[in-house]
Amino acid sequence: MEKLKKHWGIDSNWQILVILVVFAVTGSSSAKLAGPLVEFLGLHQQTSHWLLYWSLRILLIFPVYQVLLVSFGWLFGQFQFFWAFEKKMLSRLGMAKLLRL
């Protein structure tokens, strides 16, 4: 635990628990919300080609996850951690300059 706290730059085991809960809630929520978003775009699992439907659904998970991660981080009082995490992840993907972060 100490190694993880040092790596993440946090002080307590409570923060680790909160951060892990935020990651879990965000992952589940983004996967769940991608379905209605795909249907909102006019693609339905029963009537669309499976490859198109699932490709778009998986692609939508990424931006939904990014927004929810910072949002849930804020709700759980860990905005600073997740904002720094978000900027680091997007910079590694080469998107930080694009988004001016």
Image: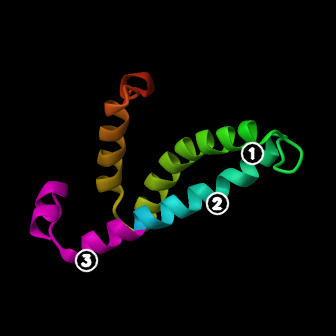
Q: Mark 1–mark 3 contact, CB under 8 Å?
A: no
**Front position among marks 3 and 2:** 2
- Cα separation, mark 1 vs mark 3, equals 36 Å
User: What amino acid is found at the position of numbered circle 1 in the picture?
Assistant: Val
Q: Nearer the viewer, residue 98 or 94?
A: 94
Q: Nearer the viewer, residue 72 or 3?
A: 3
- Residue 26 position (above or below residue 2): above
Q: Which mark is residue 30?
A: none
* Image-based side of 49 in relation to 1, left or right: right
Query: Start and end of the magenta stretch?
Result: 1-21
Q: Which residue is mark 3?
A: 14
Residue 76: quadrant of the picture: bottom left
- Residue 2 position (above or below residue 62): below
* Image-based side of 14 in relation to 51, left or right: left
In magenta segment, residue 91 = no
Ranked by sequence position, the earlier of labels 1 and 3 is 3
In magenta segment, residue 5 = yes
Farthest residue toward the bottom?
Answer: 14
Q: Position of residue 31 (x, y in %)?
A: 60, 56
Residue visible at 15% across and 57% down in the picture: 9
Q: Which mark is residue 32?
A: 2
